[in-house]
Amino acid sequence: MSALCEDYQRYLEPGFIPFDPVELARRTEEIVCRGDRRKYTKFYCTGVYGGIATGFACGCCLRCIFCWVNWSRDFPEKYGSFRSPAEAFYQLSRVARKARVSQLRISGAEPTLGKAHLLGLLEKVESSPFRLLILETNGILIGADPDYARQLARFKKVHTRVSLKAGTPEAFTSKTGGRPESFELPFRGIVNLLKAGASFHVAAMTADPRIVTKQERQKLLERLSLIQPALADNLEEEVVAPYPTTLKRLQHAGVKLKWDKGRR
Ligand code: SF4
């Protein structure tokens, strides 16, 4: 492990010290970004959204206990290869052509790390024959930097999916490791996207009462409604899935969930 990574935040364990996600983003960018190049672990096609070519970005600024992402989230220095915007676009195009799909996605851990890279890649998508790129984000950096939303809104082919992690500051800390005051950042990101006129929608694990209680779900919906009622009406609600990394992270955090038979 390099000196850079000695006190780097990995997965959560009982008694963890809450961190500033923006500071963790900055530290993670030191690992996964070099100029306008950033690390990806793979490019592949998947059936979600009706078939989509996906770039799996390395590194994140949260440490969700239910996260499904591979260990590149926790140990970004060990995984992935640096790609320029042109190289990432080439890889996405290659995968899309092979699978005969016209949509692209940047997902994985947190694709908004490395703003120069992402905007460079989006420029290439905008002038390409592809019809859509879906950007999947936790919204932290879009909340911390109002210019991010303005930049994203420039691209007519870009649709952002903001994935909220909690409905209260306390739940945000216990589930993501981020300090309670950072709970506001993704909501601020949503406001920034709205003001900028960007195409986006909001998702949350609110269909899973093991992760988000009824009361917390209600608070999250009310918070969204205060910004704009349609955001709550159109919330994409999902459940946690028992990926091996998810199970291990829950175990590290000391959280036990009951799973239906056959789901693990
Ligand atoms: S679930 Fe998303 S935001 Fe949370 S740690 Fe994983 S990649 Fe990051």
Image (spheres, rainbow, N blue to C red):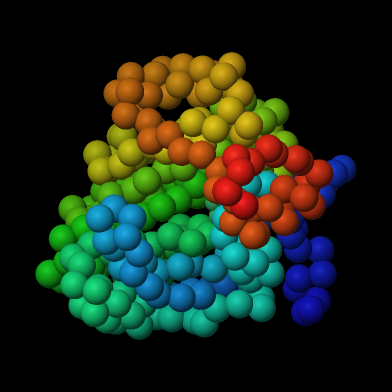
| Viewer-side residue, 167 vs 118 | 167
| Viewer-side residue, 83 vs 204 | 204
Number of labels in the image equals 0
Q: In which quarter of the image is the N terminus?
A: bottom right
Q: Return the residue found at the far right.
A: 15
| Viewer-side residue, 203 vs 185 | 203
> From where the camera sits, is residue 29 visible?
no
Please indicate whether residue 171 sits to the left or right of residue 109 in the image.
right
Please indicate whether residue 200 sits to the left or right of residue 238 in the image.
left
Residue 47 position within the rendered picture, expressed as x and y whole percent measured from the top left: 32, 60
> From where the camera sits, is residue 194 visible?
yes
Residue 128 position within the rendered picture, expressed as x and y whole percent measured from the top left: 16, 71
Residue 24 position within the rendered picture, expressed as x and y whole percent measured from the top left: 66, 56
Residue at 49% of width from left, 31% of height from top? 207
Residue at 46% of width from left, 42% of height from top? 163
Residue at 70% of width from left, 39% of height from top? 257
Residue 168 image-quadrant placement: top right
Q: Return the residue found at the far left.
A: 129
| Viewer-side residue, 262 vs 94 | 262
4 is higher (above) or lower (below) than 182: below
220 is higher (above) or lower (below) than 202: above
Residue 126 position within the rendered picture, expressed as x and y whole percent measured from the top left: 19, 64
Q: Return the residue found at the far front.
A: 261
Residue at 50% of width from left, 30% of height from top? 206
221 is higher (above) or lower (below) than 73: above
